């Protein structure tokens, strides 16, 4: 067997191992993400139950206070009351004390469950983040091995240059995908998850508080959906502004920077010189991305005045 065939065999075996590892990492990340969403939902329910138990406890404490006062009154003037009235006073005071004990125990259990969920959420978020990072790294390795190196015998002389160049391209692609994935996860995906939770909450509010409160929640939900749609449009525009093909670089930059001003509450001074002239498409795209990447950097509070 020639050296090139041996190398190809090693690469194929490595690819299989890397692919299996990558799938396992994806599965771990997805399972953790699903558990994370389920626990976030349960945490909201537990917090609502805690608030409800606290409210019931306050009411029961008031009733228990009245029952104790009644019992004191009966005890002081025992001869003025019948045996049945005395028995009822004792039983009522005792029942409220039992209810209070049950409610307090329920509150303790709910608080403990809430704390457990919050600790678990911290660990799960860390697991999801690390799984995404590892999956991205494994994708870089897999794509590299499955492309140029499969036929490495034909390009052995310039393998080092192609290796460095290929990795740079793949890393750049993965970085862009990671940014897009993060924007979708933090924006539309998170908003859609909130829409699902709010829709379930509306059903409970309708059952517990009536149609007026439910309508208020629906109005808020409509605003949330509208905001999610605007975020999706912004992401699409950042990926490929159609105005760049139709209008050219200068009008597209003007519109982009105006949107940046409104969104970040800063002043941007945009100046261009010479005649408006269409450049080759790849030049316009490169210049637009250069400006776009510059204005994607975080803005500190002391610099929220003017960009030039």
Image (cartoon, helix red, strand yellow):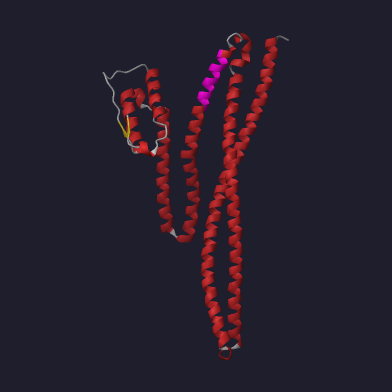
- The number of callouts visible is 0
Q: Is residue 263 visible?
A: no
User: Taking 5 as reference, is 33 above or below it?
Assistant: below
User: Residue at 59% of width from left, 72% of height from top?
Assistant: 97
Report x, y in % for residue 130: 59, 35
Q: Is residue 119 visible?
A: yes
User: Residue at 59% of width from left, 42% of height from top?
Assistant: 124
**What is the span of residues highlighted in magenta in the rendered image?**
161-174
User: Taking 8 as reference, is 230 above or below it?
Assistant: below
**Extreme residue toward the bottom, this view:** 79
* Residue in the foreground of this view, choosing between 163 and 147: 163
Q: Quadrant location of residue 230?
A: top left
Left-right relation of 194 to 87: left
Q: Is residue 182 magenta-colored? A: no
User: Residue at 61% of width from left, 68% of height from top?
Assistant: 101
**Extreme residue toward the front, this view:** 302
Report x, y in % for residue 27: 62, 35
Looking at the rendered image, the quarter that the C terminus falls into is top left
User: Residue at 30% of width from left, 28% of height from top?
Assistant: 270
Label the magenta part by its dominant secondary structure: helix
Left-right relation of 5 to 146: right
User: Taking 209 as reference, is 1 above or below it?
Assistant: above
């Amino acid at each position: 067997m020639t050296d090139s065939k041996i190398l190809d065999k090693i690469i194929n075996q490595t690819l299989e191992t890397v692919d299996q590892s990558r799938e396992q990492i994806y599965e771990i990340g997805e399972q953790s993400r699903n558990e994370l969403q389920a626990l976030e939902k349960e945490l909201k329910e537990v917090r609502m139950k805690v608030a409800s138990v606290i409210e019931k406890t306050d009411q029961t404490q008031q009733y228990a206070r009245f029952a104790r006062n009644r019992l004191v009154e009966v005890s002081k003037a025992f001869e003025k009351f019948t045996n049945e009235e005395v028995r009822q006073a004792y039983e009522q005071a005792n029942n409220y004390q039992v209810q209070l004990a049950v409610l307090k125990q329920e509150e303790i259990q709910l608080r403990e469950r809430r704390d457990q969920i919050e600790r678990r959420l911290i660990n799960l978020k860390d697991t999801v983040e690390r799984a995404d990072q590892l999956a991205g790294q494994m994708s870089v390795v897999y794509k590299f091995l499955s492309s140029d190196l499969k036929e490495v015998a034909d390009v052995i002389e310039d393998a080092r240059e192609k290796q460095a160049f290929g990795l740079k391209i793949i890393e750049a692609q993965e970085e862009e995908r990671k940014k897009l994935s993060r924007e979708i996860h933090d924006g539309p995906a998170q908003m859609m998850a909130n829409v699902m939770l709010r829709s379930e909450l509306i059903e409970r509010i309708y059952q517990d508080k009536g149609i007026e409160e439910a309508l208020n929640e629906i109005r808020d939900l409509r605003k949330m959906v509208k905001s999610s749609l605007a975020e999706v449009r912004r992401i699409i525009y950042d990926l490929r502004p159609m105005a760049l093909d139709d209008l050219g670089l200068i009008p597209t930059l003007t519109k982009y920077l105006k949107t940046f001003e409104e969104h970040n509450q800063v002043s941007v001074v945009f100046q261009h010189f010479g005649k408006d002239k269409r450049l080759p498409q790849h030049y316009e795209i490169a210049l637009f991305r250069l400006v776009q990447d510059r204005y994607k950097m975080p803005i500190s509070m002391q610099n929220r005045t003017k960009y030039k």
